Image: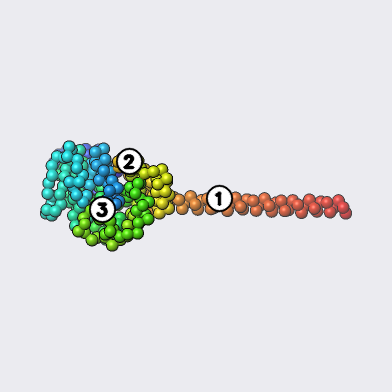
């Protein structure tokens, strides 16, 4: 797992460097400030009911390192057995933070995602290990590509947040038992209140169900086919085929009850990396095919010359 840092180029590495210089007036060595890798951000998307919160709980309960989580509703995580404290963090009283016994932390998603992530990162200054990952759970009607674009724009604009973090992957969960039905659904989200987490919110409500479903799959680096135990085999096969057609470069994982190891998600290439590798392989195959054809052409040329030589020899004999 990638190890994050609470302050790039400011975090003091554990122990003292052998190459450190002697401190003034004493023989002790100075601690060396070691640059740390930015904390990877994982964007988690999917319709309401696909199992995002169940997956988050699995990651938190099996965490080997400290994880920060940004969710819409902290209470929905519902892992009371491991809760240590619930606090109001920062000046914004709308930001709820729950610290877990294993060092992980959950923040409720504020009005501004960048502010919420900054608040979560500030928890690292309270001691303990830095976050190894931060997972942002989007609402069921959120468009992950728009979120990714906003984060990239902030990074390109020089936001100090991205001295400490970096966008890693977009992970989309789908319900294997309902995906094909939703894919053929041409009604609007506003007509499917069971898909809206807040019936009073009109954000994205005018989108068609299939439009949002396609957007969430196309934007993903990893697509998790959840609830495979509830899907008939022919439905599961159709779901695999549609997902692959929509996003041929995404890694596809199949599971039940959201049990996908976070390490597998982190180790997976991004869709862009997979696409680049596929294009390299296709180019190599294209070159190899041309080389093979060229070799045949060369052989054919020799054969042609040999035939002429043979005919010439016969002509000579005839003469």
- Front-most of residues 263 and 49: 49
Mark 1 near mark 3, Cβ–Cβ under 8 Å? no
Direction right: furthest residue: 319
| Cα separation between marks 1 and 3 | 53 Å
Secondary structure of residue under mark 3: helix
Position in image of residue 10 (x %, y %): 21, 48
| Cα separation between marks 1 and 2 | 42 Å
Q: Which residue is mark 3?
A: 194
User: Which residue does the image show at 20% across and 58% down from the upper left?
Assistant: 200
Secondary structure of residue under mark 1: helix
Disc with the residue nearer the chain's start (1 vs 3) = 3
| Cα separation between marks 2 and 3 | 21 Å
Q: Which residue is mark 1?
A: 288
User: Which residue does the image show at 29% across and 52% down from the upper left?
Assistant: 47
Position in image of residue 132 (x %, y %): 26, 43
User: Which residue does the image show at 84% across and 54% down from the upper left?
Assistant: 315
Direction bottom: furthest residue: 206
Disc with the residue nearer the chain's start (1 vs 2) = 2
Disc with the residue nearer the chain's start (2 vs 3) = 3
Mark 2, mark 3: which one is toward the viewer? 3
Residue 68 seen by the camera: yes
- Left-right relation of 235 to 61: right
- Left-right relation of 95 to 159: left
Secondary structure of residue under mark 2: loop
- Front-most of residues 215 and 301: 215
Mark 1, mark 3: which one is toward the viewer? 3
Position in image of residue 145 (x %, y %): 32, 57
Name the image quarter holding residue 58.
Answer: top left
Q: Which residue is mark 2?
A: 256
């Amino acid at each position: 797992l990638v190890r994050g840092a609470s302050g790039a180029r400011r975090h003091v590495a554990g122990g003292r460097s052998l190459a450190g210089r002697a401190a003034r007036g004493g023989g002790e060595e100075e601690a060396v400030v070691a640059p740390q890798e930015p904390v990877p951000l994982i964007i988690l998307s999917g319709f309401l009911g696909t199992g995002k919160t169940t997956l988050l709980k699995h990651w938190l309960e099996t965490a080997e390192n400290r994880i920060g989580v940004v969710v819409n509703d902290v209470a929905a995580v519902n892992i009371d057995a491991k809760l240590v404290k619930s606090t109001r963090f920062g000046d914004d009283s709308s930001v709820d933070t729950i610290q877990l016994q294993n060092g992980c932390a959950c923040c409720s998603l504020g009005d501004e995602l960048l502010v919420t992530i900054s608040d979560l990162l500030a928890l690292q200054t309270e001691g303990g290990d830095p976050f190894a990952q931060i997972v942002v759970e989007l609402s069921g009607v959120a468009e992950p590509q728009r979120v990714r674009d906003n984060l990239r724009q902030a990074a390109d604009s020089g936001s100090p947040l991205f001295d400490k973090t970096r966008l890693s992957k977009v992970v989309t969960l789908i319900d294997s038992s309902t995906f094909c039905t939703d894919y053929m659904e041409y009604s609007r989200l506003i007509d499917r209140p069971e898909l809206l987490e807040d019936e009073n919110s009109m954000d994205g409500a005018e989108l068609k169900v299939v439009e949002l479903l396609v957007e969430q799959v196309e934007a993903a680096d990893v697509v998790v086919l959840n609830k495979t135990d509830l899907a008939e085999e022919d439905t599961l096969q159709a779901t695999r085929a549609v997902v692959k057609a929509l996003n041929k470069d995404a890694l596809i994982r199949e599971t039940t009850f959201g049990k996908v190891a976070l390490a597998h998600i982190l180790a997976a290439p991004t869709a862009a990396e997979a696409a680049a590798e596929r294009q390299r392989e296709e180019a190599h195959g294209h070159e190899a095919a041309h080389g093979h054809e060229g070799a045949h052409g060369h052989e054919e040329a020799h054969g042609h010359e040999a035939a002429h030589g043979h005919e010439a020899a016969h002509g000579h004999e005839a003469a």
